[in-house]
């Protein structure tokens, strides 16, 4: 997303005082160079391996890192929990930490959960034993806890959306309205008259305009299928899509705030085909999840992204000595237990100087967003493909060691970029078949390309070259300063979400545009996806009935989220106990109007939703015809 947005949202003005520890105390331990400087946030050696004990145990926080959370757990991944023993954890100022070892539900590791937080700025030493039968392999490492940019906060709650006051009511031209569902006012969707047929249902989460925000499903012609207006007003959603959880197809979306119990911070919703929330996912180690990525992986693990602001001496890259940096990271979570299986920080592997931003104007109030993680994709070999907007590069990360194997794009690209293959401020790096990678290349902001585009790049690992093999630019031209994605469908089509530009489109490999639509001016959606979806709400269909001026009445029927309705049947009569069924009427869009000739105000109506075989799959309550 745009640089200015991240800087405004990364944190509030802080002081070099956290967890009740004075700066002088930190300087006395050698963990700060002077009382006038923030601590270093980068390790003495970059890109070290996190695989210990003969490379069998992958640990986090990263060995030698200086960006750990004070609330971190100690993650040890790769061996059964029963093979881990004698774990001792000692802080340089807080001393020995008691705790417990909790196994991952996947059976391949465990996290040591300290009984209390660490102190900001202290060095932590971990020792453990890997037991292989009668043989024990000792391993140890150390890391340093970051000094948080906002003293006393669990996370600086880095938003990646521009925060604004609660949206105002929009003009009628900018939203859809329905007689049967008056509480729904989703933003209007304008579909191109020449490109009207998407391959599947479309998933987006509109925000930024005046009106209701929330996850939204459109049919293949752009008609509304489901919309969930979020509360309170101004609550935002992002990365809305279909995934698999516990063997079933589910809906997932990031939401901020996501209120459950006493928790009012950002989180991720997992909902079933009835649109009921079945699980809420929070980040681990005291962080909040960021909207950029939430991917459920096999065995019910998930990868999420996190933004947090920490104090950092930026003088080596032209910034302030008492500055702050956006610590962007990813976590692999065990969804059943909530434990953090693994954590990877860009600060440990990619130097600050690789950015295309300048650190000079950054401060505690506007942390230096040098990396800006915005997608994580698990490749077929298990490595992670991590995209960085602000270094203009994607990184192949060894999932066992955490080390960067190669870099595509940016200042130190491992590949020679042939014409058209270079990206700028890009999003959504995804590994495709045949060693290819797709990007949404924003090309802004500031503007580097004439327009944003979707591209596919082929990598030659022998010659170490990257070649542009496919490109799609919208007509008329669009420049999306932030957000955006490219989804490759099984038939080779591309679904492109144009992010801040507010458009969504589908294009064939031959270049034919099948679908093109846009939100009202000023509205945005972080990503757009196309997926087949079957939903049946557990709430009944909605119904309103109105008498006409010339006799007769009209029933208005809808069922928010129901995908199997083929037709509606109205039952009408003088009393709720005397309703006669009419002929079925084909479903038409989100709300279907059903003519009721001869029915006057005061009569009673119910509607039944019928599937393609004519079976009743839902019934509304009985309503009275209004005059």
Image (tube, grey):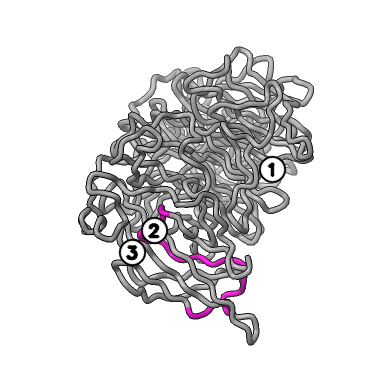
Horizontal side of residue 473 vs 41, given as left or right: right
Residue under label 2: 144
Write down the quadrant of residue 510 in the picture.
top right
Q: Is residue 84 magenta?
A: yes
Q: Is residue 402 above or below residue 337?
A: above
Local SS, label 2: strand
Q: Are marks 1 and 2 in contact (CB under 8 Å)?
A: no
Q: Residue at x 68, y 53 (%)?
A: 382
Q: Are marks 3 and 2 in contact (CB under 8 Å)?
A: no
Q: Which residues are magenta?
A: 66-86
Tag shown at residue 611:
1
Point out residue 362 in the picture as x, y percentages from the top left corner: 33, 33
Mark 1, Cα crowd under 10 Å, few <14 / some 14-19 / many 20+, is some
Point out residue 396 in the picture as x, y percentages from the top left corner: 64, 45
Horizontal side of residue 202 vs 444, given as left or right: right
Q: Residue at x 32, y 52 (%)?
A: 147
Q: Residue at x 65, y 15 (%)?
A: 193
Horizontal side of residue 1 vs 536, given as left or right: left
Write down the quadrant of residue 341 in the picture.
bottom right
Point out residue 228 in the picture as x, y percentages from the top left corner: 48, 40
From the viewer's side, name the closer residue of 307 and 461.
461
Q: Whole-Å distance between the Cαs marked 3 and 2?
A: 10 Å
Tag shown at residue 118:
3
Dot 3 or dot 2: first in sequence order is 3
Instruction: Please identify the residue farthest to the bottom as the structure is shown.
Output: 134
Point out residue 308 in the picture as x, y percentages from the top left corner: 39, 46
Task: Indicate the quadrant containing the C terminus: top left, top right, bottom left or bottom right.
Answer: top left
Q: Whole-Å distance between the Cαs marked 1 and 3?
A: 58 Å
Dot 1 or dot 2: first in sequence order is 2
């Amino acid at each position: 997303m745009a640089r200015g947005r991240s800087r405004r949202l990364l944190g509030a003005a802080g002081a070099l005082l956290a967890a009740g520890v004075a700066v002088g105390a930190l300087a006395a331990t050698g963990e700060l160079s002077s009382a006038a400087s923030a601590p270093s946030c980068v390790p003495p050696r970059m890109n070290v391996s996190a695989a210990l004990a003969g490379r069998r145990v992958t640990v986090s926080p990263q060995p030698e890192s200086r960006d750990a959370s004070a609330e971190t757990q100690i993650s040890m991944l790769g061996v059964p929990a029963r093979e881990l023993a004698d774990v001792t954890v000692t802080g340089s100022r807080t001393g020995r930490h008691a705790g417990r070892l909790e196994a991952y539900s996947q059976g391949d590791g465990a996290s040591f959960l300290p009984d209390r937080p660490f102190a900001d700025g202290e060095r932590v030493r971990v020792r453990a034993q890997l037991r292989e039968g009668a043989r024990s392999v000792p391993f140890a490492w150390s890391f340093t806890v970051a000094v948080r940019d906002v003293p006393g906060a669990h996370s600086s709650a880095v938003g990646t959306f521009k925060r604004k006051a609660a949206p105002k009511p929009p003009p009628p031209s900018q939203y859809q309205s329905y007689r049967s569902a008056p509480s729904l006012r989703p933003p209007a969707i304008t579909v191109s008259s020449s490109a009207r047929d998407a391959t599947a249902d479309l998933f987006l989460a509109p925000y930024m305009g005046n009106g209701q925000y929330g996850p939204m499903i459109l049919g293949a012609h752009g008609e509304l299928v489901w919309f969930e207006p979020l509360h309170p007003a101004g609550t935002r959603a992002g990365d809305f899509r279909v995934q698999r959880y516990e063997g079933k197809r589910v809906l997932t979306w990031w939401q901020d705030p996501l209120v459950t119990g006493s928790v009012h911070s950002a989180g991720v919703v997992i909902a079933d085909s009835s649109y009921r929330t079945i699980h809420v996912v929070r980040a681990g180690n005291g962080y909040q999840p960021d909207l950029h990525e939430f991917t459920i992986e096999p065995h019910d693990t998930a990868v999420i992204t996190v933004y947090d602001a920490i104090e950092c001496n930026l003088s080596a890259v032209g910034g302030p000595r008492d500055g702050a940096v956006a610590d962007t990271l990813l976590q692999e979570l065990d969804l059943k237990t909530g434990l953090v299986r693994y954590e990877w920080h860009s600060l440990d592997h990619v130097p600050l100087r690789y950015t295309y931003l300048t650190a000079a104007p950054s401060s505690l109030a506007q942390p230096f967003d040098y990396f800006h993680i915005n997608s994580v994709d698990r490749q077929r070999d298990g490595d992670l493909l991590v995209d960085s907007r602000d270094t203009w590069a994607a990184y192949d990360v060894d999932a066992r060691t955490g080390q960067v194997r190669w870099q595509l794009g940016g200042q130190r690209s491992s590949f020679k970029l042939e014409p058209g293959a270079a990206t700028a401020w890009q999003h959504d790096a995804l590994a495709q078949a045949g060693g290819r990678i797709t990007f949404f290349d924003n090309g802004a902001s500031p503007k580097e390309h004439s327009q944003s585009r979707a591209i596919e790049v082929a990598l030659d690992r022998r010659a170490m070259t990257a070649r542009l093999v496919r490109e799609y630019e919208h007509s008329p031209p669009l420049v999306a300063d932030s957000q955006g994605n490219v989804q490759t469908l099984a038939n080779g089509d591309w679904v492109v979400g144009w992010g801040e530009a507010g458009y969504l489109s589908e294009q064939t490999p031959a270049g034919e545009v099948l679908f093109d639509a846009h939100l009202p001016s000023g509205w945005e959606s972080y990503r757009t996806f196309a997926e087949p979806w079957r939903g049946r709400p557990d709430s009944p269909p909605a119904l309103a009935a109105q008498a006409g001026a010339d006799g007769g009445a009209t029933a208005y029927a809808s069922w928010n989220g129901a995908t199997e309705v083929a037709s509606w049947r109205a039952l009408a009569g003088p009393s709720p106990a005397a309703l006669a069924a009419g002929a079925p009427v084909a479903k038409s869009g989100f709300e279907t109007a059903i003519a009721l000739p001869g029915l006057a105000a005061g009569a009673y109506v119910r509607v039944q939703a019928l599937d393609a075989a004519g079976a009743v799959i839902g019934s509304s309550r009985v309503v009275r015809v209004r005059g």
